[in-house]
Image (cartoon, rainbow, N blue to C red):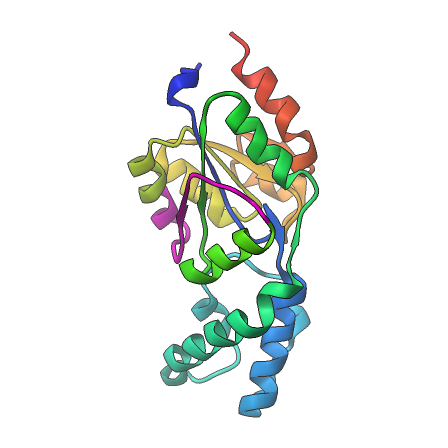
Amino acid sequence: MIERAALTIGFDLDMTLIDSRPGIKAVYDFLAAETGAVIDSDLAVGRLGPPVEQELVHWFPASDVPAMADRYRALYREHGVAGCLALPGAREALAAVQKHGGRSIVVTGKFTPNARRNLDALDLVADALHGSVFGTEKGTVLREEGATIYVGDHLGDIIGARTGGALAVAVATGPYDAEALSEAGADVVLPDLTVFPDWLDSYLVP
């Protein structure tokens, strides 16, 4: 049982708190048109989670990836933020943490300034934001922040929670279904964030 006064809960961003697929698809389409590269944007948005460099290696020579990542991030700032939506239950999940006197932190593979733009545009309020981290790197952040729960949709989020010593709560709103998340080692699997407040209430009851 965690002490409520010490409660810190981490959340992933893309496909956990927000549906970023429309905005990211638009950015990949802009990048393809600008560079002449062939990019299957539907395929790309179907495997969101890792930092963008890990996706760009599928579409550009390795030597071009750093420059393309910079360009992608610039295009995202211009064209990607407006296309993103808060997922059902996102605001209520963050409010549930606050109700219990806790801190909510966002720990994401997304470039930090663009993650901040997403949160601000959708009026999603968190106590801290850490970007450009994935997998075990998320675990390092979670441990430093004292997070006892981490909520995400990706197998890399489960790895991050495990590495950071946090309870791995998975939501089946991203590229993996509930069965895959459970098999990957999630401690708790929820269909989406709409049920998170009730789950948190029951988890924190002595």
Taking depth in this image into account, of 205 and 121 the one nearest to the observer is: 121
**Picture layout, residue 40 above or below residue 47:** below
51 sits left or right of 33 in the view: left
Residue 163 included in the magenta stretch of the image: no
The answer to whether any part of residue 2 appears in the image is no
**Picture layout, residue 48 above or below residue 74:** above
Q: Residue at x 43, y 43 (%)?
A: 159
| Span of residues in magenta | 123-139
Q: In which quarter of the image is residue 80?
A: bottom right
Q: Position of residue 142 (x, y in %)?
A: 36, 38
Q: Which residue lies furthest to the top in this view?
A: 206
Q: Residue at x 47, y 67 (%)?
A: 52
The answer to whether any part of residue 184 appears in the image is yes
**Picture layout, residue 39 above or below residue 197:** below
137 sits left or right of 110 in the view: left
Taking depth in this image into account, of 189 and 141 the one nearest to the observer is: 141
